[in-house]
Image: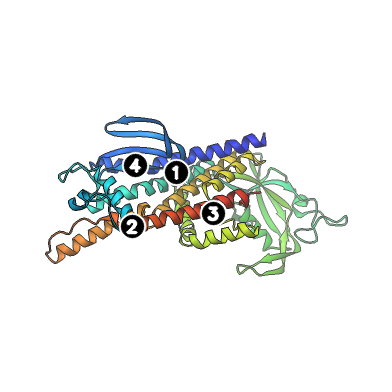
Amino acid sequence: MEILAFVIGVVLMVVGLAVSIALHELGHLWPAKKFGVRVGQYMIGFGPTLWSRRIRGTEYGFKAFPVGGYISMAGMYPPSPQAASRGGRAAGGFFATMVQDARDANDETVHGDDDAHVFYRLPVWKRIVVMLGGPVMNLLFAMVLFAILLTGIGVQTATTTVARLSECVPTTSSSECAESAPAAPAEEAGIQAGDTIVSIDGEPVADFDEATAIIRSSPGEQLTFVVERDGTEQSLQVTPAAIQAEVTAADGTTSTEEIGFVGIGPSVDYVTQPILAGPQMALQNVGAVAGIIWQLPAKVWETGVDLVTGEERDPNGPLSIVGAGRLSGEVAAADSPILNRVAGFLSLLASLNIALFVFNLIPLLPLDGGHVAVALWDGLKRAWAKLFNRPPPKPVDATKLVPVTFAVFIALLVMGGILILADLFNPVSLI
């Protein structure tokens, strides 16, 4: 049964990834078509085509390996000079050939110099909208997932409802009761399991942390507890016992202090959050993921070293799709209530979409951020020419950056391979 649950978790992550990719590509497709660009294909996955259908000039389909996706837009780059087109294969070595191949492939999508339905002819701002549409869709999807998680399901919170009572006052906050230990103040005062604490000494308490703060700061002081029991409120006098406990300060140092103890344990329940809590959490995660992406080469190197040495990996380090699937399987197979497992899966999928958003903003081709950088450079050149009354410059020929694109692709391939191996043989685990 546990193996089946694990497999279901992995399959759910694959489906979630496919949906995330589909939304990403839809974020490119919709504005591209809206701006009149001819889109040849909208594909989810890579490899052999499993299914496709052509609708209004665009082929929509699924490929065998759902680890990516793409749309093919006509004229991503300006057409190459006619002289280069007539010259056949480019001389000058491997990279020169790659540049010419990229130009030839691009030229096949352009129907003459007067073709208006090509990407490179769009105004700069429209090109940026098209390229940012994909990452923004991932961000919006993450916001929706976090909203479902926080507002639809809620956050597990220790509530003010009493779930259990201690039998006695321990010597310290963590030790067990001795035979001669006095009865716990809560039990002596008549507090019962199921009571909900409304206020303490006239101060309303919204959660267990607020109640705990008052109790811990009042050793030996009589407090008036107002509790709700069976729909009615009752006032009870409770004097917290003084015990010694280790307290950790904000700077990480610990010290032994005297704190109050009454002997109540809270019930834990899902508490729904305001509707804006989901988007806020998504934006907070963007900052955290950006910090990891910024250090990605170093983080991957550390992961590779841990793989070779067998050291435990940083749980907050980067993961591959294999690692995300493995964690999803562990969440599904965990010995916990179904709602907890659903919440864990939604959190993983939302975090994956945040990673897709941030990663695709890196200003390097072939990533979306690289295309945005090219469009901005083109716009800057045009603005400069207009400012000094010069003729409009030629569109930026991004095919010249094919060697850089190739280098970035190889680097991503190597880093992805290291992460996959690490996720297979030295995985991050929730257990």
Left or right side of 222 for 300: left
- The residue wearing badge 1 is 144
Q: Name the residue under label 3.
A: 418
Which one is nearer the viewer's eye here, 237 or 142? 142
Residue type, mark 2 in image: Gly
Residue 257 position by quadrant: bottom right
Q: Which of marks 4 and 1 is in front?
A: 4
Find residue 171 and report its horizontal and vertical position in percent: 80, 61
Assign a secondary structure to mark 1: helix
Q: What amino acid is at disc 3? A: Ile
Q: Which residue is drawn at 69% across and 58% down?
A: 223
Q: What element carries label 2?
A: loop
CA gap, disc 1 and disc 3: 31 Å
- Point out the frontmost of discs 4 and 2: 2
Task: Say which label, 4 or 1, has the lower sequence index.
Answer: 4
The amino acid type of the residue labelled 1 equals: Val
Q: Considering only order in the chain, which callout, 2 or 4, is on the residue closer to the N terminus?
A: 4
Q: Name the residue under label 2.
A: 93
Q: Where in the figure is residue 208, as x and y percent of width and height?
A: 63, 52
In the image, 186 versus 371, the foreground residue is 371
Q: For the residue labelled by badge 4, is the local secondary structure a helix, a strand or a loop?
A: strand
Q: Which amino acid does label 4 sit on?
A: Ile
Q: Nearer the viewer, mark 2 or mark 1?
A: 2
Label 4 to label 3, Cα distance in Å? 28 Å
Q: What residue is pinned by disc 4? A: 71
Q: Between residues 420 and 313, which one lies in front from this camera angle?
A: 420
